[in-house]
């Protein structure tokens, strides 16, 4: 498998940098690894939220207003 990578520089406020350092120390992972994982999660969450906003009107039109409505029909 071939990966293309790119270097990104970012500035962190001191408090966020301290949290990052602590997570790296406790988990034994590199800063890059922690930041990549956090970015993947955030991008997945953003994609989910965009999809949710697009389908919400259709779900509401079908009577799906809360999570329990969905659970009722899939259980």
Image: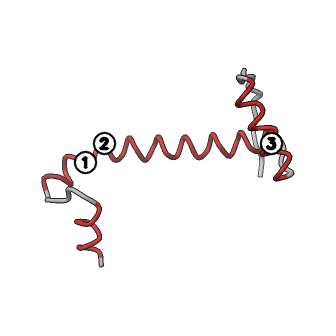
Depth check: 57 or 17 in front?
A: 17
Q: Which of the two labelled residues, at mark 3 and mark 1, occupies the earlier sequence position? A: 3
Within 10 Å of disc 2 (Cα), the crowding (few <14, some 14-19, many 20+) is few
Q: Position of residue 11 (x, y in %)?
A: 72, 20
Q: Position of residue 16 (x, y in %)?
A: 70, 31
Q: Which of the two labelled residues, at mark 2 and mark 3, occupies the earlier sequence position? A: 3
Residue 10 located left or right of residue 29 = left
Q: Position of residue 24 (x, y in %)?
A: 82, 45
Measuring 17% from the left and 52% from the top, which residue is drawn there?
Answer: 60
Depth check: 55 or 3 in front?
A: 55
3D distance between C-alphas at marks 2 and 3 = 35 Å
Asked where in the image residue 65 lies, by quadrant, the reply is: bottom left
Could you say whether the residue bearing mark 1 is in a helix, strand or loop?
Answer: helix
Q: Position of residue 50 (x, y in %)?
A: 38, 40
Depth check: 41 or 7 in front?
A: 41
Depth check: 38 or 58 in front?
A: 38
3D distance between C-alphas at marks 3 and 1 = 39 Å
Pointer 2 with pointer 1, Cβ within 8 A? yes
Label 1, on which residue? 56
Q: How is the image coloured?
A: secondary structure
Measuring 49% from the left and 45% from the top, which residue is drawn there?
Answer: 45
3D distance between C-alphas at marks 2 and 1 = 5 Å
Within 10 Å of disc 1 (Cα), the crowding (few <14, some 14-19, many 20+) is few
Label 2, on which residue? 53
Measuring 70% from the left and 41% from the top, which residue is drawn there?
Answer: 36
Residue 47, numbered label: none
Asked where in the image residue 14 lies, by quadrant, the reply is: top right
Q: Judge depth for marks 3 and 1 and give the one in front.
A: 3
Label 3, on which residue? 22
Could you say whether the residue bearing mark 3 is in a helix, strand or loop?
Answer: helix
Tally the numbered discs: 3
């Amino acid at each position: 498998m071939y990966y293309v990578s790119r270097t990104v520089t970012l500035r962190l406020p001191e408090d966020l940098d301290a949290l990052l350092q602590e997570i790296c120390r406790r988990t034994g992972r590199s800063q890059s690894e922690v930041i990549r994982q956090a970015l993947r999660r955030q991008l997945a969450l953003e994609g989910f939220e965009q999809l949710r906003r697009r389908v919400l009107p259709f779900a509401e039109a079908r009577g799906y207003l809360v999570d329990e409505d969905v659970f009722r029909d899939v259980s």
